[in-house]
Image (spheres, rainbow, N blue to C red):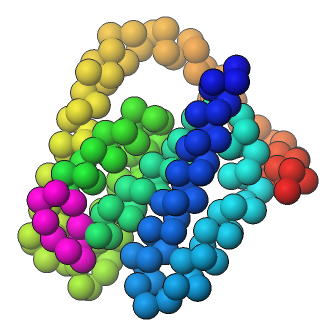
Amino acid sequence: VVAARSLSGVAGAVALLGMFWLGSELFPTSKSARWIAVAIVAVSPFHVPYSHEAREYSTWAAITIISTATMLRAVRRPALGWWLLYALTVAVGCYTDLIFAYVVAAHGVALLCLRSTRTLLTFGSFCVSAAAGVLAFTPWLLAFFQHRAVLAYDVGWAANAMPLQVYLEKIAFNASAI
């Protein structure tokens, strides 16, 4: 239990470092904005408790932050190395949680929405990197497909709707952890 919880703690600390990097990518001229971004994550009512639990959420948060910073760096300073690093973060993100596919989709939408990044080379590099990251996840996709009946049974509870009150109680519980 200690090893699993310490991994979440390390991932939580990595998320703070990643947020500093993401802040520097988003606000390159403001040093205070970087520290404010780190402070917001450091006291987040979700980040703090999940960094103490033996679950994947802190790792998912860290890889989401790092992949976003990597994508922004690859867009601003196009080089093969940055796009390869982005592909690696996509692969790690997919192995961490399947929901990471939504992060990659959000990255693609962001690139399409920003006028300065709407070039064929930039979007093509993004697509190739994202596809390479997902391709690295293919062995697990094949395993999911082969064992889909077991997976459907194991995650069948997720199809049940939970009342809004349950979500609000969870948010209140997490906020009290600060």
Front-lying residue, 156 or 113? 113
Above or below: residue 60 compared with residue 43: above
Q: Is residue 27 left or right of residue 61?
A: left
Front-lying residue, 81 or 159? 81
Residue depicted at 54% across the width and 77% down the height: 34
* Dominant SS type (magenta): helix
Q: Tell me, yes or no, whether the highlighted magenta stretch contains residue 75.
A: yes
Residue depicted at 56% across the width and 83% down the height: 33
Residue depicted at 41% across the width and 14% down the height: 148
Q: Is residue 33 visible?
A: yes
Residue depicted at 85% across the width and 56% down the height: 178
Q: Is residue 168 visible?
A: no
Percent of width and height locating residue 138: 24, 27
Task: Look at the image and give the residue range highlighted in magenta.
Answer: 74-82
Q: Is residue 124 left or right of residue 74?
A: left
Percent of width and height locating residue 165: 87, 47
The number of numbered discs placed on residues in the rendered structure image is: 0
Percent of width and height locating residue 168: 84, 52
Above or below: residue 69 compared with residue 77: above
Q: Is residue 167 left or right of residue 64?
A: right
Percent of width and height locating residue 26: 43, 79
Front-lying residue, 149 or 92? 92
Q: Tell me, yes or no, whether the highlighted magenta stretch contains residue 36.
A: no
Residue furthest toward the bottom?
29
Q: Is residue 67 left or right of residue 3?
A: left
Front-lying residue, 47 or 119? 47
Quadrant location, the N terminus: top right
